[in-house]
Image: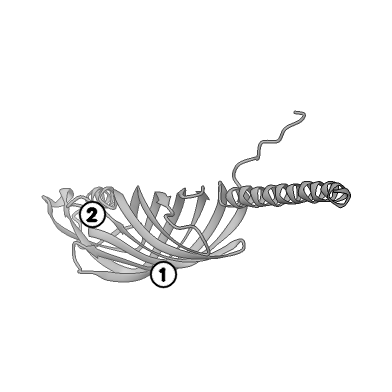
Amino acid sequence: MRIRSRALPLVALAAVAAVHSLEAQSAHSDRSSVAQVRDNRFKWFFGAEGGAMFFETQSQTTSRIPAVGAHIAVVARRAGLMLGVDEAFGSKQPSSFLDPSDNFNLRGVTFDRIRRYGFTLTGYPIRGALEPYLGVGFGITQVINPTVTGVFASADQAAVSTAFAKEVSTAGFASFMGGVQFRVGRIAAFGQYQINSAPAQDNLLRGPLHTLLGGFRFSLGSAREDVKGGGY
């Protein structure tokens, strides 16, 4: 009985120590989980990409020209917002339009660049080192500096024709995006495909616009200040 009475305090002390150890481990695990959640929430990213743009015009079937671009993205745990601009570079790409200055006869036009401004809502169904993502959005596509061709009866006619060519060089679009990125620290390598809806029938471009791009995204830090207690 005396031995048991001496052992009871030791058992109680060991039990208390075990409880404190479990509480410390639980608190550390909770802090790690919170830190991981915060690491994936409300981050700013800057991205740069390059690839190809595929398009059709009123005078040619599918063509491919090189494209480059940049974007800013803010990403939460499973959703984000991306704002970007891409520009494709060609050489004397042909198209045509019905010229109102010439009784709506067909007028030829050439251009060298296509520019696209996009606003995309993105979703990340799986978070980790390898992350697929999807996006839907809208934007504006522009044929830059179209040059009309052919013979004009006067300078005024040429001016009217040029002005109308610029009117049919811009179109709004809806888009769908699919891609995958591989994250290592603050840098992510990515590849993505995007398709835009077709413009109006009288536009210089015809049919859907496709882009296939790859590049890198760089983390710019948190887009949300953590709430801190104590003081102002």
Per the rendering, the mark at residue 51 is: 1
SS of the residue under disc 2: loop
Location of residue 62 in the rendering, given as x and y in whole percent from the top left corner: 23, 69
Residue toward you, 208 or 145: 208
Q: Residue drawn at (67%, 49%), measured in percent from left and top?
A: 26
- Percent position (x, y) of residue 7? 84, 51
Q: N-terminal of the two: label 1 or label 2?
A: 1
Task: Identify the image quadrant of residue 209.
Answer: bottom left
Give the number of marks: 2
Q: Disc 2 marks which amino acid?
A: Ala
Q: Secondary structure at mark 1?
A: strand
For label 1, count other residues whose C-alpha is less than 10 Å away and answer few (under 14), some (14-19) or many (20+): some
The C terminus lies in quadrant: top right
Q: Amino acid at mark 1?
A: Gly
Residue 171 can be seen in this image: no
Q: Are marks 1 and 2 in contact (CB under 8 Å)?
A: no
Please name whichever residue, 42 or 119, is drawn nearer the observer in this view of the structure.
Answer: 42
Which residue is denoted by mark 2 in the rendering? Answer: 198
In the rendered image, residue 220, in percent from the top left (x then y), is placed at 61, 53
